[in-house]
Image (cartoon, rainbow, N blue to C red):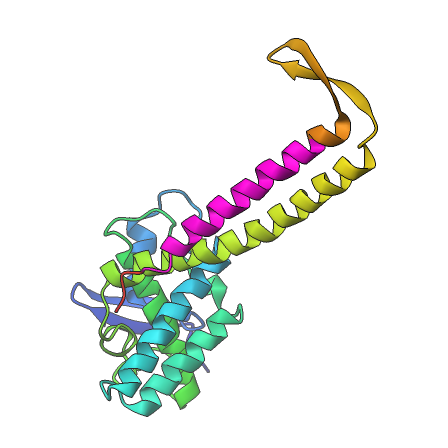
């Protein structure tokens, strides 16, 4: 009969971790110490995907440089691909707000990736002597690298979503500007009547403003490509 818990150890001692959980002891301690907002990182799927991209890139680089055994690197890459595909996001149980500049969520990611990778290699969750959250998954990294890089990547991906929506809005305003090009209305200066204009001109002004905002967002988005890693 399978036990409901597994035992994991750290410098502070040992703790029982739910047997089905892919997170580990560092995540458990973070859940206890930083229960601040009640909103966990699983509520931000783009952020989890971005973290997985960062961890995957590190594993690929470490494999190429022979810093990691190729089998271990491949297991990490497999685990990251699972997260990128939207799986195991419910294992990101740390609070969005935490101490340590992101250390808790970084270790949460390391532990989840390690345990997915361990099962991929044929081991049990928690057998970190074969694939370790810190020594292997976090190899050549620190929280001060991974956390801000993942945030910037998540924002970059989020901007793409907003750009698509803004483009649709701009096209809708442009369509209305043509539809109402012959409809006259009073222009407005503050709260007073001003020079007459068409309703189409007003909608065209909206479309032009949204177009400028799209350009500004694209320029700002480019700056997110310069990241802390590497």
Image coords of residue 160 (percent x, y): 53, 55
Q: Residue furthest top?
A: 192
Whether residue 10 is visible here, answered yes or no, is: yes
Q: Nearer the viewer, residue 192 or 138?
A: 192
Which residue is pictured at 49% across the width and 70% down the height? 84
Q: Nearer the viewer, residue 136 or 14?
A: 136
Vertical comparison of 123 with 27: above or below: below
Image coords of residue 5 (percent x, y): 38, 71
Magenta residues span: 203-226
Image coords of residue 96 (percent x, y): 38, 49
**Quarter of the figure with the C terminus:** bottom left
Image coords of residue 168 (percent x, y): 67, 48
Does the segment drawn in magenta span residue 147? no
Q: Is the magenta stretch mostly helix, strand or loop?
A: helix
Answer with the quarter of the image where residue 28 lies: bottom left
Answer with the quarter of the image where residue 29 lies: bottom left
60 sits left or right of 87 in the view = left
Answer with the quarter of the image where residue 73 lies: bottom left
Does the segment drawn in magenta span residue 217? yes
140 sits left or right of 58 in the view = left
Q: Which of 83 and 227 is in front in this view?
A: 227
Which residue is pictured at 65% across the width and 38% down the height? 207
Which residue is pictured at 42% across the width and 74% down the height? 80
Whether residue 27 is visible here, answered yes or no, is: no
């Amino acid at each position: 009969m399978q036990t409901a818990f597994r035992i994991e150890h750290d410098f502070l001692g040992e703790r029982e971790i739910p047997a089905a959980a892919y997170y580990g002891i560092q995540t458990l301690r973070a859940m206890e110490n930083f229960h601040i907002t009640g909103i966990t990182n699983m509520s931000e799927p783009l952020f989890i995907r971005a973290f997985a991209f960062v961890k995957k890139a590190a594993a690929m680089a470490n494999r190429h440089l022979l810093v990691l055994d190729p089998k271990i690197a491949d297991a990490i890459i497999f685990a990251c691909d699972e997260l990128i595909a939207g799986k195991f996001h419910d294992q990101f149980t740390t609070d969005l707000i935490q101490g340590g500049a992101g250390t808790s969520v970084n270790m949460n990611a390391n532990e989840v990736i390690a345990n997915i990778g361990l099962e991929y290699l044929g081991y049990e969750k928690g057998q970190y002597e074969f694939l370790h959250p810190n020594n292997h998954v976090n190899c050549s990294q620190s929280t001060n690298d991974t956390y801000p890089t993942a945030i910037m990547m998540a924002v970059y991906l989020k901007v793409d979503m907003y750009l698509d929506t803004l483009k649709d809005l701009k096209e809708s305003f442009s369509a209305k500007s043509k539809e109402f090009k012959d409809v006259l209305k009073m222009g407005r200066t503050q709260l007073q009547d001003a020079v007459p204009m068409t309703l189409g001109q007003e909608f065209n002004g909206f479309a032009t403003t949204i177009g400028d905002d799209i350009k500004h967002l694209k320029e700002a988005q480019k700056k997110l490509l310069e990241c802390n890693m590497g």
